[in-house]
Image (cartoon, rainbow, N blue to C red):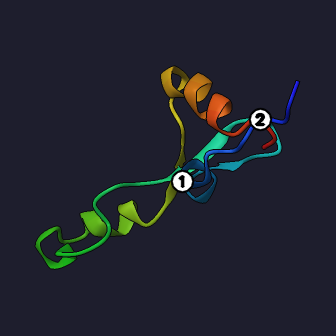
């Protein structure tokens, strides 16, 4: 079997943790943050990929 290619777009968006889960950044943190008030601070934090999407992310990152 040939080597599988990593989806480069996914490699830039997701990082694997030591426990095997995937971290991701939150959406809506690019511009117009002044309208959001203090909610904008929470968008700067990372969160985990949901269980429903983990299988798809693992397929895009075969060597992560």
SS at mark 2 in the image: loop
Find numbered disc 1 in the image and state the secondary structure of the residue it sits on: helix
Image side of residue 28 versus residue 12, left or right: left
Whether tag 2 and tag 1 are in contact, CB under 8 A, the answer is no
Percent of width and height locating residue 53? 51, 27
Name the mark on residue 43.
none
Residue annotated with mark 2: 4
Front residue (pair 45, 21)? 21
Q: Count residues near mark 1 (Cα–Cα under 10 Å), then give few for <14, some for 14-19, many for 20+.
A: few
Left or right: where 47 falls relative to 21: left
Query: Would residue 57 appear left or right of 21 to someone viewing this image?
Result: left
At x 21% / y 74%, what residue is drawn?
33
**Which quadrant, please, contains the C terminus?**
top right
Q: Quadrant of residue 34?
A: bottom left
Quadrant position of residue 7:
top right
Which percent across, then down, holds residue 45? 48, 61
In this view, the residue farthest toward the bottom is 34
Residue depicted at x 65% and y 41%: 22
Residue named by callout 1: 9
Q: Is residue 17 left or right of residue 31?
A: right
């Amino acid at each position: 079997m040939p080597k599988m290619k990593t989806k480069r777009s996914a490699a830039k968006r997701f990082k694997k943790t030591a426990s095997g889960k995937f971290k991701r950044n939150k959406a809506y943190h690019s511009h117009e943050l002044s309208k959001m008030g203090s909610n904008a601070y929470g968008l700067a934090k990372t969160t985990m990929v949901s269980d429903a999407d983990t299988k798809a992310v693992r397929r895009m990152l075969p060597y992560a």
